Image (cartoon, grey):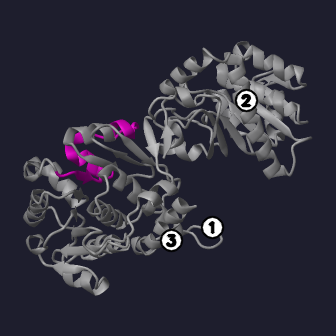
Amino acid sequence: MRGVWTPEQIRAAEQRLFTRTPEPAVMRRAAHAVARHTAQVLTECTGGVAGRHVTLLVGAGNNGGDALWAGSFLRKRGVGVTAVLLDADRAHQGGLLALRRAGGRAVRAEGPNPDTTGVGAEAAEAVQRADAVVDGIVGLSASGGLRPMAAELVDRVLMPIVSVDLPSGVDPVTGAVDGPAVSADVTVTFGGRKPCHVLGPGAVRSGDVLVADIGLDGDLPEPELHVLDAADVGAAWPVPGPEDDKYSQGVVGVAAGSATFPGAAVLAGGSAVRATSGMVRYAGPAADEVCRRWPEVVVTGSVTDAGRVQAWAVGPGIGTGASGRDVLRHVFDSGRPVCADADSITLLGADPTLWDARDPDAPVVLTPHDGEFERLGAGPVGTDRVAAARRVAARFDVVLLLKGNTTVVAAPDGRVLVNDSQQAWPATAGSGDVLTGLIGALLASGMDPWLACGCATRVHSDAAELAARDADGVGAPIGASALLDQVPAAVRAVRRAALT
């Protein structure tokens, strides 16, 4: 499980490190990592390092200092280096001296003979001839988009960008982008990932995130956020053992769909089957359709006749009228873990008295998208998705899975998992029904609800990726049925990762 730390946590850890190791030595350690990975980018893109040219976009402060020191190391490998100084009077003096001593040169961003945008001729030429660009414009203390001069220079870049710590212009805490920002091919960060590397647009703009060890490991506190690797999911995913039978693996009840709209029932029930649930019981008016598509599902027409289950997945397509309310009330009253999605969330927002039927000892998972989140009476999600999810999880004492390109899973005790998918293939009708079935099956197995949501989200995302891409890696839009068909392959992949 990968940790993610806030800028404040990283800065505090750095201060503890500086009591043992001088700050300039730590900076050189960080810069060496930037230089090493920039050299790798050069090799991949141009076939070599010596004789190539790297341009540094250098802001004030330590972020710019890291870039300048990285430039000095690249010079020693035969790379031509030009630093474009966005604030020459506040450039890091130690880094600038090191670059010049190594034979690099520095020019002002505005310089003499500026063009109509204010960019100097030397700066423009340096950006245009670069084989790679190092983004050292702003660091973890920045907020808002790039200033006009920096934005203009970034807009002229044609070759790969290596960002120092984070893509400049991305909010370090929320990953939001409010104005011009860098889109990096590689981000080299120090000590640990930051929220901007896994949240929102920042996750996409960070490119490949590489964590450089600068000696912080013993000084870092408990991470603010967690990200599950494939191996984590594979190790947690339930598989039958020699002593298991269909009951011991977990029996999940699915209450979804209607006679008019049976698709939600077919998708949610099918995903529970393909999640390797020991038994799936479907209860609802789409029983015939579910049985026709999934003959292994035990079907009945009503939740009152469903029999014993270890967890419920409820909501997709049940409607928001009286019958839907009765279904949700019965499921809440069962005393079993519940994953409530879609119409269930709308019902809870419209009629908060439905919460009264809930067994206080039975965990509940809510899985809203942004619109459903607002229907709960929680207000707009806003740019800080983690804070929003935490707030609602604590308010309702639930595990809150906030859907989106970046999915946030918040437990009522404040723990947060993030699935930092960089693709949007699951953005299709019915894919949420598939996710509901996956979560329900994992809840029935006895898995911790917070972890169950994280594991289900990862497999759901991986299945969408498998469904969308052909052997050549070319993506195309998919339907939820195609995503569902790839769930077993996605489970096998995470299991394989856990075993290797």
The disc at residue 23 is: none
Q: Earlier in the sequence, mark 3 or mark 1?
A: 3
Question: Which disc, if any, is residue 31?
Answer: 2
Q: Is residue 186 above or below residue 439?
A: above
Residue at 54%, 35% (x, y): give it. 170
Q: Identify residue type, mark 2.
A: Ala
Under tag 1, what secondary structure?
loop
Other residues around mark 2 within 10 Å, as few (<14) / some (14–19) / many (≥20):
many
Residues in magenta, as a range: 362-388
User: For the point 48% across and 47% down, which residue is it?
Assistant: 1
- What separation in Å lies between label 3 and label 1 (alpha carbons)? 11 Å
Residue 72 x, y percent position in the rendering: 83, 27
Q: Is residue 390 magenta?
A: no
Q: Secondary structure at mark 3?
A: helix
Look at the numbered disc 2 and give the secondary structure of its residue. Answer: helix
The residue where tag 1 is placed is 473
* Residue toward you, 214 or 207: 214
- Kindly identify which numbered label has been placed on residue 467: 3
Is any part of residue 143 visible from this angle? no
Determine the CA span between mark 2 and mark 1: 34 Å
- Of the residues under marks 3 and 2, which one precedes in the sequence? 2
Q: Report how far apart the C-alphas of labels 3 and 2 lie in the structure.
A: 40 Å
Going by the image, does 481 lie left or right of 300?
A: right
Figure quadrant of residue 278 = bottom left
Q: Quadrant of residue 197?
A: top right
Quadrant position of the C terminus in the picture = bottom right
Label 1 crowding class (10 Å Cα cut-off): few <14, some 14-19, many 20+?
few
- Amino acid type of disc 3? Ala
Which of pointers 2 and 1 lies earlier in the amino acid sequence?
Answer: 2
